[in-house]
Amino acid sequence: MRIAIAADHAGMDLRDQLAHHLRLKGHQVDDLSPENDPEDDYPLIVEPIARAIVGGRYERGIFCCGSGIGPAVAANKIPGIRAAVVEHEWSARDAVEHVNVNLITLGERVIGIEIAKAIVDAYLGAQVQGGRHERRRKQIEDLEKVKAKT
């Protein structure tokens, strides 16, 4: 799977360990992080990843920071991105199965590396489900279209 990964200053260690873990599992992982800059701003870092996912360069994305919250909010401003803060395996799997999340954000200050590895494995192994979930995803897409018109 083609995966984009990135981090701000608060998520670099987690990013590095996850990228290594995913490469060992055979995934193509591209680190889209800027050079180490203590003044980096996560909205400016997550935007290119989000646009690359929407543009089809990557199947999924992972962003690491201190909490995961800010980048998820910022990424969800990009039409076509469905980002979620994930802190355990169940949510990672559910986010893909029900909502077709294409970008997860993880907080290095919130979760440890072994939990993070389990989360990304669940995220990448999950398959989108149909039925009522498909109907709800369409409703989300409709909300996005309305937002774009206003």
Image (cartoon, rainbow, N blue to C red):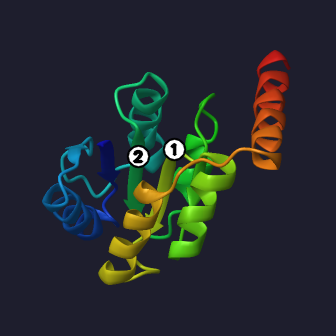
Q: Is residue 41 visible?
A: no
Q: Is residue 134 above or below residue 63?
A: above
State how far apart marks 1 and 2 are (Cα): 6 Å
Q: Nearer the viewer, residue 137 or 111?
A: 137
Tell me the residue at 62%/41% (across/down): 76
Q: Give, as a three-letter code, the residue at label 2.
A: Gly
Q: Would you say the residues marked 1 and 2 are in contact, meaning their CB atoms lie under 8 Å apart?
A: yes
66 left or right, relative to 24: right
Image quarter in which the C terminus is found:
top right
Which residue position holds label 2?
A: 61
Q: Secondary structure at mark 2?
A: strand
**Mark nearer the N terminus (1 vs 2):** 2
Q: Is residue 90 above or below residue 16?
A: below
Mark carried by residue 45 = none
* Image coords of residue 83 (percent x, y): 58, 49
Q: Is residue 140 above or below residue 65?
A: above
* Image coords of residue 41 (percent x, y): 42, 48
Looking at the rendering, which quadrant does residue 74 occupy? top right
Image quarter in which the N terminus is found:
top left
* Image coords of residue 16 (percent x, y): 20, 63
